[in-house]
Amino acid sequence: MGKTMAVHEIPERATMPVTGLVNTYTYGTEALAYGTEALHATGSRWLGRLGVWLRGDAVFAQLIRFALVGGLSNVGYILLFLAFYGGGPQLANLTGSIVSTALANEMHRRLTFQAADRVRWYTAQLEGGALALAGLAITSGGLAILEVTEPGIGGLTEAIAVLGITAAVGTMRFLTLRLWVF
């Protein structure tokens, strides 16, 4: 059997000096803090550049803003549709469409296409409203078909169906707004 050593008999070269341990810990903490600061600075620069790009005139940046405005408009539409559903799905669709479209047209004029200085409010409402009427006709037709083929389907299901149709119409709307209105 081998000889056992007591703790006090461990050779000095086998132990790390306390100052070395403290320096290692401090250096590691400073490196972590530096890395965190560098990551934060890089993230802030990247987000800043992304923000500048998203506010620019690039087609894809406009498409992203268009989708965000459309998404908010759709949330408003669903809330209005459900609020007015007691009067029937056609009234709910008409009310939701008019109010959400007027708000969306203004947000598109100011935010999506940054055309507040080039296109007056009433022009945006008139031309954007004409596009919305086409969308309203398509969604109303879709609702009429649903009422005949699936009677009693329910308000939420009908609202989701209208949103699906609206997504297809939205693509055409973006291109028309971008190329013609704004």
Image: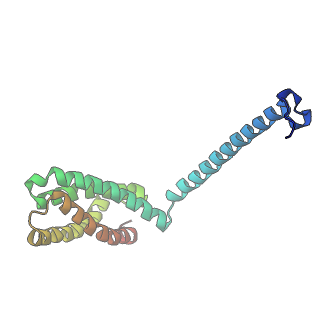
Closest to the observer: 172 or 10? Answer: 10
Q: Could one spot residue 115 in this view of the protein?
A: no
Residue 27, percent from left and from top:
78, 38
Closest to the observer: 31 or 25? Answer: 25
Closest to the observer: 128 or 101? Answer: 101
Vertical relation: 173 (above or below) 17: below
Q: Residue furthest top?
A: 8
Q: Image check: 2 left or right of 144?
A: right
Vertical relation: 163 (above or below) 17: below
Q: Could one spot residue 122 in this view of the protein?
A: yes
Q: Image check: 146 left or right of 58?
A: left
Instruction: Residue 66: name its quadrant.
Output: bottom left
Q: Quadrant where the N terminus lies?
A: top right
Q: Residue furthest front?
A: 1
Residue at figure coordinates x 39%, y 68% from the top left = 178
Residue 175, percent from left and from top:
37, 71
Instruction: Residue 25: name its quadrant.
Output: top right
Residue 122, percent from left and from top:
28, 58
